[in-house]
Image (cartoon, rainbow, N blue to C red):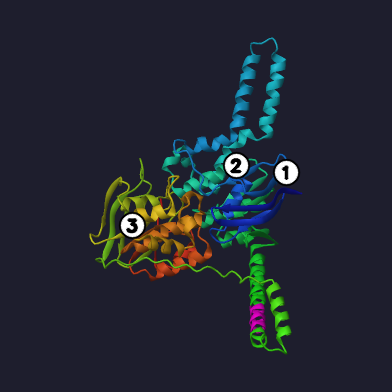
Amino acid sequence: MSVLEAKDISFSYDHQRLFEDANMRLFQDDHAVLVGPNGHGKTTFLKFLAKELSPNKGNISWLNHVKVGYLDQFLALRDDQTVEIYLHDVFEHLFQLESKMIGLYEEASTSNQAMRLIRHASDIQDILEKEQFYQFKSKVDNMVQGLGLSLHVLKQPIAELSGGMKVKVMLAKLLLQDVDVLLLDEPTNFLDKKHIEFLIQYLNQYKGAFLVISHDAYFLSKIAKTVFAIEGKKIEKYKGSFDFYLSQKALRHAQAEKAFKEQQQLIKKEETFIQKNLTRASTTKRAQSRRKKLEKLVKIEKPHTKRSYHFDFPFAHRTGDVVIQTHDLLIGYDVPLLDPLNMEIRRGQKVALTGKNGIGKTTLLKTLLSEKSSLGGQFHLIDTVKIAYYSQVEAYDDHETAYRFFRGYYPDVEDKFIYQQLGSYGLDYDKCHRPLKTLSGGEQSKVRLAVLKKQPSNLLILDEPTNHLDDAAKDALIEALQDYQGTLILVTHETYFYEAICDDVIELYA
C-alpha cells in the first residue's frame, strides 16, 4: 500500500526549472533514498513532502492518518531551552495526561463520586502504560547515548552545543516520535563513524517508511532498498540497493552516450549527402527527402557528464617553523571540555583534528582564532600567520544573497569577477541573487568556499567543509587541499577525506 503519491510535480525558482511533471510513489515499508547532484532540488522536493513548500503544479497526497517526521538540514533550535526540555516535548501530551490522572485521584479522595473518578483515572493510567510513558526516561537516555551524546548534555542549554551536537539532538527528538514515515535531510552531517553505524542499524530495523537525502555513499549503500534519482527534471525509481542504482546508472549513461554518438554520426553523414547532392538535378529529390527526414528527427540530448569543480586556496607567504603552540590551554564554557592541552603545529603540516562530537573541536578552533576566550593556559600563533577560516555553520539574514555575501568580503572587485567565481561552482546569475537560505546546503557551502579563493593564507582552518557537498565537489576539494602550500587544520567526520589529505592526526579526549 502506498502512503504517498506525488503526481505531475513541476516547480521553478525564478528562471530555473527544477522539476517538470515529476512523479514519486512511496510505499509503507519503503526504505528509500533520494539522490542527485547539488542544486538539483532534493531538499526542495523533501520540503514539498513535508508541506513546508508548495510546487507550482501537481499534487502531493498522503494516506489518511499517516504521521510524518521531518529532519530539516537547516532546522533552527531555540537556544534558551535545555536539551532535556526540548526532547521531553515529544512526550508533552503524555505529561498532560499524567497531570490529569493525578488530579482525578486527588479529587476522588474528597468526592462522593470517587468510583467514577477512579475509573476515569485508571483508564488514563492504562493509556500511559500502553504508550510506555513510564519508560520515557530510559528511551531518551538510550537514544541520546546511541547518537553519541553523554547524559550530562541533557542539562545543557542548546546555545552551548556544537553544530554536531545540535544535529544529534534534533535527530534524537525525531527518532523518539511515533511516526509512520521519516523524511531525513542529510542526517549524517557531523556524525562520526560509530554513530553513523547506530543510525544505520536504527533505520534498517525501522518498521515504517523513510526517504533519506545524503551524500555519504557508504551510508546510502547500507540503508537503501529503493533509490529515487533526480534525472532531467524527473524522478526515476530504481528498485534495489544503492550499488544496484550505481551500476544501472553507469549502464544507462554508457547506452545514452552510444546512442548520442551514433545519432551524431548519422546526422553528419546525412548533412554531407544533402550538401553534395542538393544542387544536382539527378539527386536533388533524394537530398530534399533526406533533409525533411532530418528535420523531423527527434534529437538525442547529449548525456549529462559529471560536473567538474575547481577549488583554490592561494598561498600568502612562508611563516616561521612553529605556527601554533599551546601550553596547558583550557577551553570550554563554564567548565573545561578537555584536560590542559599542549600541542605544536609546524609550518606545512596538514593536521586532522578528530574526536567525538561535543568534545571541543570547534571550541578549540574558535579559541585559537580569538573568537572565544580560553579558561586558562596559553596559546601562541606566529606573528607572520595569515589565516583563512571556513566555519562549521554560517547564519544569514533573510535578504543575504550569494552576490552580497561575496561582495561583503571583496567590496572593490568587479561584478564580472564575482559572477565568474560563483559560476564556476554552478551558480548562475539568478542563483547569485536568490536569498542564500533558499539555496541547497551544497550550494551554500560552495559559496563560502568560493570566498576563500581570493584570500591568500598560510594557515587554512576548515571546520566540516564536506557537509552537504556531492562527490564531485569533495574530490575537487581533496585535490585543492593536497596542493595547498601552507599549514592546514581540518575538522571532518569523514575519515576517508582527511586520510587523503593529512599527514598528522590530533585526537581530542575528555
Q: Which mark is residue 505?
A: none
Measured as percent of width and height from the top left, residue 324 is found at 29, 59
Residue at left offset 43%, top offset 57%:
447
Ranked by sequence position, the earlier of labels 2 and 3 is 2
Left or right placement of residue 313 versus residue 83 in this view:
left
**SS for dot 2:** helix
| Front in this rendered view, residue 349 or 146 | 349
Magenta highlight on residue 268: yes
Residue at left offset 32%, top offset 50%:
367
| Front in this rendered view, residue 450 or 496 | 450
Q: Amino acid at mark 1?
A: Leu
Ranked by sequence position, the earlier of labels 1 and 2 is 1
Query: In 3D space, how far apart are the residues under numbered discs 2 and 3 (Cα atoms)?
Result: 46 Å
On the question of residue 492 being in view, the answer is no
Query: In 3D space, how far apart are the residues under numbered discs 1 and 2 (Cα atoms)?
Result: 22 Å
| Residue, disc 1 | 63
Query: In 3D space, how far apart are the residues under numbered discs 1 and 3 (Cα atoms)?
Result: 51 Å
Q: Amino acid at mark 3?
A: Tyr
Furthest residue toward front = 281
| Residue, disc 3 | 410
On the question of residue 93 being in view, the answer is yes
Q: Which residues are magenta?
A: 261-271
Classified by dominant secondary structure, the portion drawn in magenta counts as: helix
Magenta highlight on residue 282: no
Question: Mark 2: few, some, or many residues within 10 Å (few <14, many ≥20)?
Answer: some
| Residue, disc 2 | 176
Measured as percent of width and height from the top left, residue 208 is found at 69, 48
Q: Do tag 2 and tag 3 residues touch (Cβ < 8 Å)? A: no
Q: Hey, which quadrant is residue 298 in on the image?
A: bottom right
